[in-house]
Image (tube, rainbow, N blue to C red):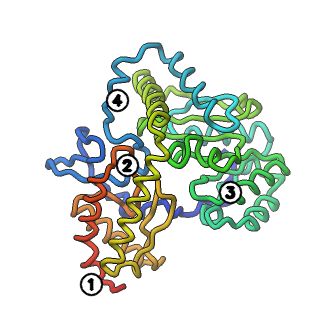
């Protein structure tokens, strides 16, 4: 894949490693907004497998579509590719991969083949989120003769940063790649690129496309797509077919329901109620809310070890009170007002003890 000129930084959207590593196992009977544990207990899921579950767990519509769908795998692949090509900016061709990481790896290898260079700049998200265009330009320009591709995950990244990335990659002849695995459909039906009107050379998508089923997609200009090699043998024929059908169903549902708007509305309600709970219990000195309403984060104001411990305590307390959060609010379309009320009750149960232990 070439050499990373800069390792990716921690994203504001990433849950603490300790919290994610301790995510408990749940039974396949989980439904909609609820995760079902081995002892029969249920948790409201505000993590949704790191945003990969857009419609809710074990969506009945997807199950029905899988049982009723006609057409072989090749035909389904063509249908999904056609729909993505019409949706994603600059998607003149589409290829599929077994996972997001495979899609990104295939894209970077194609960029290397196209440019004859070895380097890949995986953009530090702290730089991208802050909109620090000077740091971007300095890093890219310093390695211009080595750089095959610049990869940006654009969720919450300012438009001016993406525009500058577009200009600087065009200037040096590098491939601009957007990883829209978190933002496609969630913030706009065409991702951040569609929201801002700033397209990449290639856009990669992940399992959220199929409501959590394993799949990746590579959408880009003909020139680079001709160099993309994607091996789907890691997926069984049945798993691939189900993922393609799920992807078609997800796109249809989001178009019918205006999914990005629905997620923005429920996400905004979650943010408002969470902010009220923080103020109500004097915890707004410990935590701040940030991020897009469709993927908001409760971040400890202390960015050191104490802050990490406080956020872990919040996640553990919410879990004990019936909410899986891992420090974020990443709703699916299965979330409604009754679930928001359940979340508020959990915060009300957890915050007083946190404030008593750590102050505000």
Q: Are marks 4 and 3 in contact (CB under 8 Å)?
A: no
The kind of secondary structure element at disc 2 is helix
Dividing the image into 4 quarters, which one contains the N terminus? top right
Q: Which residue is most to the top?
A: 71
The image shows residue 180, relative to residue 293, as above or below, that is above
Q: Earlier in the sequence, mark 4 or mark 1?
A: 4
Pointer 3 residue:
159
Real-space Cα distance between discs 4 and 3?
35 Å
- Residue 120: give x, y in percent of width and height: 70, 51
For discs 1 and 3, the disc positioned in front in the rendered view? 3
The kind of secondary structure element at disc 3 is helix
For discs 2 and 3, the disc positioned in front in the rendered view? 3
Pointer 2 residue:
48
Q: Which residue is most to the bottom?
A: 359
- Residue 53: give x, y in percent of width and height: 40, 43
Please give left or right for residue 320 compared with residue 142 in the image: left
Please give left or right for residue 340 compared with residue 193 in the image: left
The dot on residue 61 is 4
Please give left or right for residue 359 compared with residue 167 in the image: left
Q: Earlier in the sequence, mark 4 or mark 3?
A: 4
Real-space Cα distance between discs 1 and 2?
30 Å
- Residue 145: give x, y in percent of width and height: 84, 52
Q: Residues within 10 Å of mark 4 (few under 14, many from 20)?
A: some
Q: Are marks 4 and 1 in contact (CB under 8 Å)?
A: no
The kind of secondary structure element at disc 4 is helix
């Amino acid at each position: 894949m070439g050499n990373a000129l800069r390792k990716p930084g921690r994203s504001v959207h990433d849950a603490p490693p300790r919290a994610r590593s301790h995510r408990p196992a749940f039974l396949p009977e989980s439904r909609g907004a609820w995760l079902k544990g081995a002892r029969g207990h249920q948790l409201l899921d505000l993590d949704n497998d790191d945003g990969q579950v857009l419609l809710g767990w074990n969506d009945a519509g997807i199950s029905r579509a899988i049982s009723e769908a006609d057409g072989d795998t090749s035909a389904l692949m063509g249908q999904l590719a056609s729909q993505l090509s019409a949706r994603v900016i600059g998607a003149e061709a589409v290829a599929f991969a077994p996972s997001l990481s495979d899609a990104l790896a295939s894209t970077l290898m194609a960029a290397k083949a196209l440019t004859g260079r070895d380097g890949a700049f995986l953009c530090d998200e702290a730089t991208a989120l802050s909109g620090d265009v000077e740091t971007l330009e300095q890093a890219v320009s310093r390695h211009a003769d080595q750089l095959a591709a610049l990869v940006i995950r654009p969720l919450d990244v300012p438009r001016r940063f993406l525009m500058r990335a577009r200009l600087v990659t065009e200037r040096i002849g590098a491939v601009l790649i957007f990883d829209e695995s978190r933002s496609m459909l969630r913030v706009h039906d065409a991702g951040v690129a569609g929201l801002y009107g700033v397209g990449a050379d290639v856009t990669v998508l992940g399992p959220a496309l199929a409501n959590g089923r394993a799949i990746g997609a590579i959408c880009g200009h003909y020139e680079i797509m001709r160099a993309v090699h994607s091996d789907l043998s890691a997926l069984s024929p049945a798993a691939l077919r189900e993922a393609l059908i799920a992807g078609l169903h997800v796109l249809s549902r989001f178009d019918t329901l205006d999914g990005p708007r629905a997620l923005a509305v429920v996400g905004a309600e979650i943010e408002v109620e969470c902010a009220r709970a923080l103020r109500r219990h004097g915890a707004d000195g410990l935590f701040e809310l940030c991020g897009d309403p469709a993927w908001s984060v409760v971040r400890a104001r202390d960015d050191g070890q104490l802050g990490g411990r406080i956020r872990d305590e919040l996640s553990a307390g919410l879990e004990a009170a019936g909410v899986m959060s891992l420090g974020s609010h990443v709703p699916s379309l299965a979330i409604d007002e009754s679930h928001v009320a359940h979340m508020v009750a959990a915060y009300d149960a957890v915050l007083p003890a946190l404030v008593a232990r750590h102050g505000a």
